[in-house]
Image (cartoon, rainbow, N blue to C red):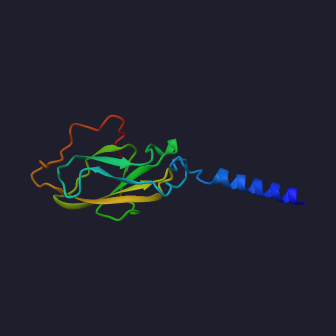
Amino acid sequence: MARGLLASIVVAFFAVACTTGSDSGGGGGAGGGAGGDASIGFASPGNGTEVSIPFEVQLDASVPLGDPSTGNHHAHIYYDVEPGASDYDIVYGTSAEVPRPLSSGEHTLTVALANPDHSLAGPSQQITVTVGSSGAGSEASPGGPAPGSTGLDY
């Protein structure tokens, strides 16, 4: 009886050890959460930057970004609304050009990490940019998306 109890404890311990930390891949699987240490944010433009339309956004994500069919996360960019609103742009890579016709003045941009099914994964960052009235802001696009960018999906 003692051997049977000891064997059961060893098997239970092994099962727990094998499943603990199994999300080490960052939650990139289809429908999976982003995990507790996932993050996303704007690498550029910086908070408070003046931009002109179109302008380029560069994202910094701790998990792979890609088309939902790949099982990877992607980013939703919201303009002057809270995450979860129905009006957003989708970014599948780490950079994209924003051609959205924002009016001159201050705008709040929020980037949120999204699961392949478009539900929000949790991490987000908010910045404020000012669209210049002269059309010549300090963060004009350098001539197109960076290599590997898939751009925005309208």
- Provide residue 30's location: percent of width, then percent of height: 55, 48
Residue at the extreme top: 147
Residue 152 to residue 3: above or below: above
Asked if one can make out residue 154 in the rendered structure from this viewpoint, the answer is: no
Residues 42 and 98: in front is 42
Left or right of 94 in this view: 116: right
Q: Tell me what residue is drawn at x 39 percent, y 51 percent.
A: 75
The x, y position of residue 11, in whole percent, is 76, 53
* Residue 52 visible at all: yes
- The single residue placed furthest to the right in the displayed view is 1
Q: Is residue 120 above or below residue 59?
A: below
* Number of numbered discs overlaid on the protein picture: 0
The outermost residue toward the front is 2
In front: 44, or 36? 36
Whether residue 149 is situated above or below residue 19 in the rendered picture: above
Query: Which residue shows up at 21% across the image and 42% down it?
Result: 141
Residue lying at 18% horizontally and 54% vertically, measured from the top left: 49
Q: Which residue lies furthest to the bottom in this view?
A: 82
Please provide percent x and percent y for residue 52.
Answer: 17, 50
Quadrant where the N terminus sits is: bottom right
The x and y percentages for residue 48 are 19, 58
